[in-house]
Amino acid sequence: MTPIRRTTWAPRLLTAAAGTALALTLAACGGSGDNPAGGEQSEAAQSTESEDSSDGGFGGGAVESKAAETPASEPAEAEPTDTKSTDPFADAATTTNWASDDAMKVDEEGNGTVPARSIEADLIDLFENKLDMKVKKADCGDDMDLREWYGFETCDVTVKDKSAYEGEKTYYGTVKIVDHKGEMIKYELKFPGIDKDDFDFKD
């Protein structure tokens, strides 16, 4: 009868089992071979997360830095202020003329109305007799309202002019009351386009 070799087989089985258990333990710990251990992986992950947070994570360090580096917006340039006069009559030929008309209704305090037709008649007389122009028409926008001897109205005078388009030329100007004496009223007239020397007959 061949004896059973239990003593030789049992240690080998125990050795194999022990080796398998050791391999499982190392795999669970992650420390075998070239693979880094669990602790090393955790540190690497923390390092990566730290770098990510420095680039704009909730820590806000990088965001504050970028905001600080952003240049402040430049103040808007102030718009230039035009102080020059835009009055179209600023350099106009100016003269004065006394006139009177029974149609004027003005009280002693200088309140009343100067009819447009009265001003138009005075303009025709002025242009024809003092400027030697043949007037086709004079037109004032409305009657002049007078308040304490002050009144203002715009008027235009159309004259014959062979050198002008369609043989006529229109001068646009203003008429203003500047003085009074009895029933007489003194006009100040401004008309751009008329030669100042020709308009030099102030009273």
Image (cartoon, helix red, strand yellow):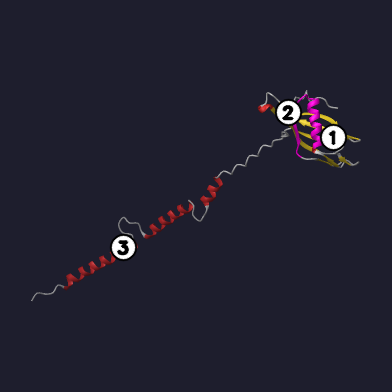
Crowd class of label 2 (few under 14; some 14 to 19; many from 20; radius 10 Å): many
Q: Amino acid at mark 2?
A: Val
Tell me where residue 125 sits by quadrant: top right
Q: Where does label 3 land, which residue? A: 27
Residue 12, relative to residue 40: is it above or below? below
- Which of marks 2 and 3 precedes in the sequence? 3
| Residue 120 image position (x, y, % from top left) | 79, 34
Total number of numbered labels? 3
Depth check: give the residue in front, 47 or 59.
59
Residue topped by disc 1: 178
Q: Name, please, the residue furthest toward the left.
A: 1
Q: Amino acid at mark 3?
A: Ala
Asked if disc 2 and disc 1 are in contact, CB closer than 8 Å, the reply is no
Q: Residue at x 36, y 59 (%)?
A: 37
Q: Which region of the structure is painted magenta? A: 117-141
Compared to residue 61, the image places residue 30 above or below, namely below
Q: Position of residue 75 (x, y in %)?
A: 62, 42
Distance Cα–Cα, label 3 vs label 2? 116 Å
- Compared across the picture, whether 187 is left or right of 34 comes to right
Camera-nearest label, 1 or 3: 1
Task: Tell me where residue 116 appears, x and y as whole percent.
Answer: 79, 38
- Does residue 37 appear left or right of residue 159 in this picture? left
Label 1 secondary element: strand
- Marks 2, 1: nearer the viewer: 2
Q: Is residue 191 above or below residue 13?
A: above
